[in-house]
Image (spheres, rainbow, N blue to C red):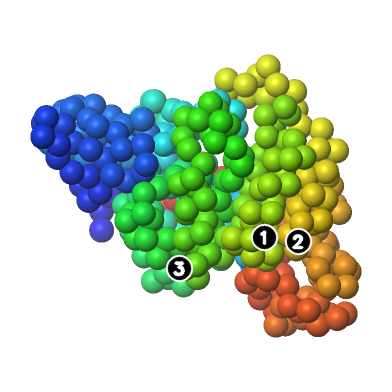
Amino acid sequence: METPSSDYPTRFWHRLDDGRVQCDLCPRACRLKEGQQGLCFVRACSNGEVVLTTYGRSSGFCVDPIEKKPLNHFYPGSSVLSFGTAGCNLSCRFCQNWDMSKSREMDTLAASASPETIAREAARLKCKSVAFTYNDPVIFHEYAIDTAIACHEQGIKTVAVTAGYISPEPRVEFFQYIDAANVDLKSFNERFYHKLTGAHLQPILDTLIYLKESTAVWFELTTLLIPGENDSDPELDAMTQWVVTHLGPDVPMHFTAFHPDWKMRDHPPTPSATLSRARKVALANGVRYAYTGNVHDSEGGSTWCHHCHQLLIERDWYELGAWHLTADGRCDRCGTVCAGQFEKQPGHWGARRLPVRLR
């Protein structure tokens, strides 16, 4: 199908008695008058309905290593065609992709592509998966789902990189088309969410429990640790205990380094020691796969057998080294299963980042 040139109709909204419409896609429940946009910027009231204004329009396409999402247990070493749009339904003061997620300029969306074109190009480029990333795919719900359907028809997997801030009904629809997700668990503190993201913690926890209990989506968690905000031992202890209790020990956790950006330039970068401390807290609380990110740390970036503690997958940044998984995803020393989705051999994409212009 051709990429729509006008506003795209959506389903998750309803009319209010005062003449406004309410968007029901996420817990923000924006109430809009004619011509107004939601906080996300891309869903707006047009002709008395909520429409998506960025269907088929992207900020650009790039082939990345899957580990960059980050996903360490979903076809390691494979390549993923990544793209996003503009806008976001959170207002994180520390946003690390603010040039896209906070964009209010439609000129940011330089690339136009139908879902079928994206799937076809992913197949041509021999990508294992397509990732909806850079900004949150929740807000381009319809475009992401149509693209996921087209990808599955080509045998291409789909990946969502998301904050998980989505309402229950659209959450069911969205994740039935997703094969893997990395969910930002930004903090385990409601005050942090309210003060620094303009959102709330509980809807994210609800999304995580839904993914665990009601879907087959492979998912991993990422927490960007900001000095003095969400890096205390008590918070890390509470978060990791909750993960093990409610999601199980096999959900990988990534603790990544913050760098001063957007509206939080007054905070220092995260010391690597903080990431190592968080990883130790997670492991001590029963998380079997805990990682450090945005720093050079081969030990913290590699996968280790939780039973015999031997190296399973060696990583140096995004380059894979030693591989000690059997063809059925077990430790080749002790036979313990490594949770995740693996092929008999790792991929060989490496650390390359390849910008592409879709045909």
Q: What type is the residue that disc 3 sits on?
A: Ser
Disc 3 crowd rating (10 Å Cα; few below 14, some 14-19, many 20+) is: few
Between 203 and 127, the one nearer to me in the picture: 203
Q: What type is the residue that disc 2 sits on?
A: Gly
Q: Label 3 near label 1: C-beta < 8 Å? A: no
Instruction: Tell me the distance, in whole angstroms, between the alpha carbons under discs 2 and 3.
Output: 23 Å
Disc 2 crowd rating (10 Å Cα; few below 14, some 14-19, many 20+) is: some
As drawn, the label of residue 244 is 1
Closer to the chain start, of discs 1 and 3, is 3
Closer to the chain start, of discs 2 and 1, is 1
In terms of image quadrants, where is residue 115?
bottom left
Question: Residue at position x 76%, y 61% from top?
Answer: 286
Residue 177 % position (x, y): 40, 64
Please tell me whether residue 333 is drawn above or below residue 268 in the rendered image.
Answer: below
Report the residue marked by disc 3: 214
Residue 95 % position (x, y): 57, 31
Q: Quadrant of the N terminus?
A: bottom left
> Which element carries disc 1, helix, strand or loop?
helix
Question: Residue at position x 75%, y 35% from top?
Answer: 232
Report the residue marked by disc 2: 286
Left/right placement of residue 228 relative to residue 10 reads right
Disc 1 crowd rating (10 Å Cα; few below 14, some 14-19, many 20+) is: some
Question: Residue at position x 68%, y 47% from top?
Answer: 238
Please tell me whether residue 341 is drawn above or below residue 352 in the rendered image.
Answer: below
Between 104 and 107, the one nearer to me in the picture: 104
Between 234 and 193, the one nearer to me in the picture: 234
